[in-house]
Amino acid sequence: MKVKVDGLRFSYNGKSVLKDLDLPVREGEFLGLVGPNGSGKTTLLKNIGGVLEPDNGTVYLDGEEIPRIPIKEIATKVAALQQETTVGFDFTVREVVEMGRFPHLDRFERHSDGDLRAVERAIDVTDLRDFTDRYVNQLSGGEKQRVFLALALAQEPDLLLLDEPTASLDINYQIKIMETVKSLQSEGLTVVAAIHDLNLAAQYADRVALLCDGSVKIIGDPPEVLTRENIAEVFGVEVEVENSEAKGTIHIFPKTDSFRTREVK
Amino acid sequence: MNRAKPKVTFLVLFVLLGFALLAGVAIGPVGIPFGKSLLILTNELPWLNFSGLPGNFQTIVFDLRLPRVFTGLLVGGSLALSGTVMQGIFRNPLATPYILGVASGGSAGAATVVVLGFTSNFALPIGALIGALAAVTVVYRISWSRGSSSSYTLILAGVALSSLFSAITTALIFVAGPYQQHRVLFWMMGGLWRSSWTLFKILLPIVTVGAGIIFAWSRDLNALALGESAAAHLGVKPETVKKTLLGLATAITAVSVAAAGSIGFVGLVIPHIMRMILGPDHRILLPAAALGGGVFLVYTDVMAKTIMQPVEMPVGVITAFFGAPFFLYLLRKKIVGGRMR
């Protein structure tokens, strides 16, 4: 899905969060959103998903303005994975994944074979086959996050919005989630992901947009955006960027005194 | 996972409903043998016609006990359904139908009517209804700003307004005469003795329509269990769901309170029991809670009528007497099990 964010302005209780933000998302790409806390990544994602209503400006999904698309129809094309979702009651994994079919169903409609196939596929892709009858509330953080990824995939979206999906997960689950998303991208899914970890963003994103204070400072290939100068300016941190040509990726290390201090101790 | 099959559960509930119907008409100050009760009831079926049934028994069954059983079903069902909705929307196991001030508003309304000296049959229910609706209207007006509201604001506003209305009720009881005091207290304890076919006919359309629309929104309520933001990403408008369902749940609670006073614990405990048996899927849970609540209230009402014969206990005492210990048991079980939700 092609997305165009045009002059988006948004404020929470008078505090301006997005300031005339423009952002083009190409069809089928993995776009990483990076930027300091409070730079507006989450708010931007919620606006793209049609969950928040902007003060000004427009989001176009495949050329169509969001306010003209009913929220239920948006949910058939756009799915989201938040950093953390809490389930109010003892729903099982399967029950939660089945909720992904909600936007595709009328009020009294039952699940069709097609709906159930989408659910089964989401369960398989996220490797949850052995968990379907477990209570979501009893799973670990990493397992839970896979459940909510499966829920999003059961929606059969064209666009997947990820908001720090792996921020609280250990490295094993981090990679599992990102690899799953990456493989779905190769099947045509467009991905927009807010990612804290600059190395993770550099590794998985085709392009990276650097957000600063409610607008996009620069957008482009990871090595082009994640430079020493840009990171110093936006995050206020001195880093070293190592270009590993062989792997086609970059590595970012913070320059700190910690090593030296440890030796002194 | 060890949940009961919905079909089996509903079958059991319907069997219990059948027995409740029979017990409700057979048991009372004048005992009517079960066999006779069954005959009297089935005699109404067009293709059956038994002769020689005692006329006074028929009068007791049709004019006194049957309307009371049906009213009990509606009131109990409404309270349990409303409690399930409140717990679902607030994602809080402690939510009750009265959380937004319906009961204390109703009590204040009823007390006002009594103190003002109205004595007609319908003065109390009408006063209670006005009080209940006034209370929740104020709560909603305070909490809903610019089209949205936080659950915390709603709950806190409900708690605050409940204590205000309780204070008003207490003040009214304080200034009232002994007879009026008795009437107010009697009303507040909650009971089904005011039941009649007229009352039932007023309740029936309101409860059926309210419950019907609530059932139709059960999937939205499921989505809301994931939080408002996740629900919105599933195409659910959280504010619309909250407004619709809270409005309907409040309405059926208000008419129940008007009809039978503030009967406690049905709306808290029945949703929990049903959720434990069937799981949290509201498509199954909501109708099961409604049915379970209705049946529970009919049985407790039978006990209320018989436990201290010839005096009739307020059914609210019985529901609390069984409901409270059971709820404590649930609480303890959850803490011991290591998960407190």
Image (cartoon, grey):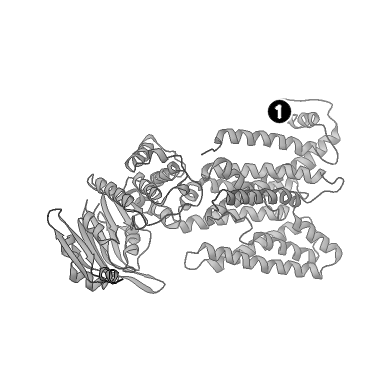
> Residue B90's x, y, as percent?
53, 57
- Seen from the viewer's position, the closer of residues B164 and A230 is A230
> Residue A137's x, y, as percent?
47, 49
Q: Quadrant of residue A85?
A: bottom left
Q: Is residue B172 visible?
A: yes
Residue placed furthest toward the left: A245
Residue in the image at 74% along x and 50% along y: B321
Q: Chain of mark 1?
A: B
Q: Which residue is mark 1?
A: B46
Q: Is residue B250 above or below residue A135?
A: below
Disc 1 element: loop
Q: Residue B9 vs residue B30: left or right?
A: left
Q: Residue A42 vs residue B327: left or right?
A: left
Q: Residues within 10 Å of mark 1 (few under 14, many from 20)?
A: few
Q: Residue A236 vs residue B30: left or right?
A: left
Q: Is residue A108 above or below residue A4?
A: above
* Residue type of the residue flagged with mark 1: Pro
